Amino acid sequence: MIKLFKLTTGETVIARVKEETEGSIYLEKPATIGVVPNNKGDMMITLIPFMLGAKKDASVSLAKSQIVAEVNDAGIDHLVKSQYLQAVTGLVLAGPNVNPDQDLKAMLNKKSN
C-alpha cells in the first residue's frame, strides 16, 4: 500500500508501506515531495530520494512519533501517485488525467474547481 506522510520536520514523504509495528513504519522506496520551478517559471512537483546514500531497495524505518499526518492510498492525488509509481517502477502510466509532467499550478487549479 502506498501512503503519504507529513513529518514533524515539514517534509512530505510518499512510499510503499512494507510493515507496521507499534512504534515504527517500514517503508520501501520512500521519496520526499518537493516543489521546484520548471523552465517556464511555473512550479512543479518533483520526487527526491528520502535518504540520500541508501540503496534503492533498502527498507527505511520511520518512527511513528515523527509523523504528524498520513493519507492512505485512496486519498493520494492521482497525479502525485502516478508520478511516484512512474519514478519507482520506470513504467509510464496511461489513462485519463495521467500527466506526470503537469505543473503544480495546474494541479491546484483542478482541485479548486
Image (spheres, rainbow, N blue to C red):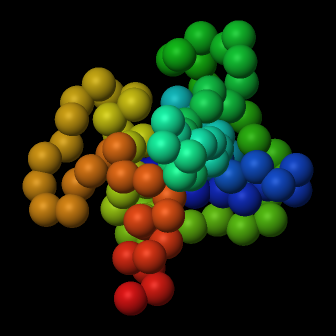
Asked whether residue 26 is in view, the answer is no
Question: With 93 as the anchor, is 14 left or right in this view?
Answer: right
State the image coordinates of residue 19 (x, y, percent, origin top left).
57, 43
Q: In this view, does 2 lie above or below 90?
A: below
Question: With 70 as the anchor, is 89 left or right in this view?
Answer: left
Question: Of all residues shown, which one is farthest toward the front?
Answer: 40
Residue drawn 57% across the image and 57% down it: 4
Question: Of all residues shown, which one is farthest toward the bottom?
Answer: 113
Quarter of the image where one finds residue 48: top right
Residue drawn 27% across the image and 50% down it: 99
Quarter of the image where one finds residue 75: bottom left
Q: How many marks?
A: 0
Q: Is residue 99 above or below residue 62?
A: below
Residue drawn 36% across the image and 52% down it: 102
Quarter of the image where one finds residue 33: top right
Question: Of all residues shown, which one is farthest toward the left?
Answer: 95
Residue drawn 41% across the image and 65% down it: 106
Asked whether residue 49 is in view, the answer is yes
Which is nearer the eye, 56 or 90? 90
State the image coordinates of residue 58 (x, y, percent, origin top left).
59, 18
Q: In which quarter of the image is the C terminus?
A: bottom left
State the image coordinates of residue 37 (x, y, percent, origin top left).
59, 43
